[in-house]
Amino acid sequence: MIQSLRSSILLKAQLHLAKLDQLRQAARTGVEVCFKKECVELGTKVELHIRQAETNRMRILKWNCTNGNRPARLGHQPDGWLMSSNTSISTLMSESDLVDSITH
């Protein structure tokens, strides 16, 4: 009688542990799938932001060139060349706006 009771308790405990292991594996698989999906989405977002930044950079360069604000050498711009007398602050996106657009 006592032996069958012990066996019954042991069997229930083993079944409970097996169920917990199944749940743990399912949760782990779910987390891995979500992680991979988020990585792909983040990579896509980064690529989009890179393209947008390049487009914005080209627009700024074009705007500066059409307004006579051409830098001496591309890649070696003097300090403040984007903020010349013809450039209003409102026409350029602020640094905090750029950070917000990248992080959101």
Image: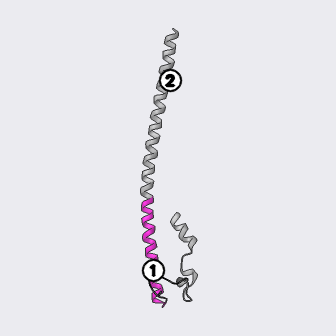
Residue at point 43% right, 79% down? 58
- Mark 2 is on which residue type? Ala
Q: Up-down: is 3 above or below 95?
A: above
How packed is label 1: few (under 14 Cα within 10 Å), some, or many (20 or more)? few
- How much space separates mark 1 and mark 2, taking CA atoms? 69 Å
By secondary structure, the bulk of the magenta-drawn segment is best described as: helix
Q: Residue furthest top?
A: 1
Q: In the drawing, does residue 48 fall left or right of residue 97?
A: left
| Residue at disc 2, secondary structure | helix
| Residue at disc 1, secondary structure | loop
How many labels were placed on the picture?
2
- Residue matched to label 1: 75
Residue 88 lies, in percent from the top left, at 57, 84
Magenta region: 42-70
How packed is label 2: few (under 14 Cα within 10 Å), some, or many (20 or more)? few
* Displayed quadrant of residue 62: bottom left
Q: Residue furthest bottom?
A: 68
Q: How is the image coloured?
A: one colour
Residue at point 46% right, 30% down? 19
Q: Is residue 104 visible?
A: no
Magenta span has 57? yes
Residue at point 50% right, 23% down? 13
Residue at point 45% right, 89% down? 66
Query: For the residues carrying marks 1 and 2, which lies nearer the camera in this image?
Result: 1
Give the numbered dot on residue 13: 2
Q: Up-down: is 48 above or below 30?
A: below
Q: Which is nearer the N-term, disc 1 or disc 2? A: 2
- Mark 1 is on which residue type? Gly
Give the numbered dot on residue 35: none
